[in-house]
Image: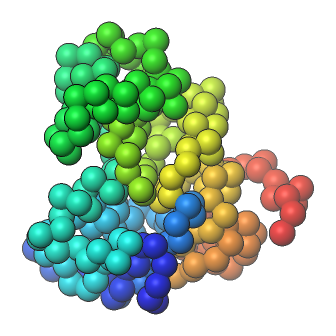
Amino acid sequence: MNGGYLSVNNLNFEYPDGYKALENVNLNLSKGERLAVLGPNGAGKTTLILHLNGIHGELKGEIKLNDISYSEENISKIRKSVGLVFQDPDDQLFMPTVLEDVMFGPKNFGFSEKQVEENSIEALKQVKMLDFIDKPPHHLSFGQKRKVAIASVLASEPELLVLDEPSSNLDPASRRELIDILKNLDVSIILVTHDLPMALEICSRSVILNNGKITANDNTYKILKNEKIMSENRLELPFGFALHHLED
């Protein structure tokens, strides 16, 4: 599959023990689009998004972002363009204060001092955490840490925001806040999630990854109401969640 703002062509990845995590994965994303990546545990979802940030090194296959190939000489440009938010915010927060954590990314990417501060303040506003700039991150709740981790990525002005299970371990109110924040961001999004109602609310299109292969690529609503696809890929909507009130 060629074309698109992000283009993944015949991507393969095998771990040193011989386990094939990704097999001939083809994927594209239009600028401004929001795409959910669904699938059971161990399907290869996290492996895929680590490739999008250049973490897994040498590629078997091809990835292009805005016609820039993923290669050693382009990797710092790719990492600035693709902001990756890990599942555990503690993997991303390590500075003494919230503001310093959010400033860390743009500082490393060579933004001017003025721009670093402006971007960081704006990012904290976007996630509604401006009142916490002087707090140590380890004093925050899990939901607050998640929002600061997102701000720490947004401050570097990524073109594509990639989130790994962003609603995991959140209480219902924090989850709702997070959905509202993501819906209001002006950036392309790839959302890896088991939270199918969240995928439906944020992403008009979804792909399913299962055993390292893409087994479905369609409108999110159509995927979720297709019992055969859901069953074959070990996906299930929460009890009591009704699709029938939503339009095709």
- Residue 32 image offset from top left, x and y in percent: 56, 61
**Closer to the camera in the image, 185 or 18:** 185
Residue 72 can be seen in this image: yes
Asked whether, in this view, residue 88 is left or right of residue 178, the answer is left
Residue 229's quadrant in the figure?
bottom right
Instruction: Estimate the x, y position of residue 3 in percent, counting from the top left.
Output: 46, 84
Describe residue 227's horizontal placement relative to residue 11 as left or right. right
Residue 183 position (above or below residue 76): above
Q: Position of residue 61 (x, y in %)?
A: 26, 85
Where is 199 relative to 125, above or below? below
Residue at 22 percent of width and 28 percent of height? 113
Give the position of the C terminus as an image quadrant.
bottom right
Q: Residue at x 67, y 57 (%)?
A: 200
Residue 227 percent coordinates (x, y)? 72, 74
Q: Residue at x 34, y 51 (%)?
A: 84
Would residue 85 appear left or right of 69 to someone viewing this image?
right
Residue 219, image quadrant:
bottom right
Give above or below for 48 relative to 22.
above
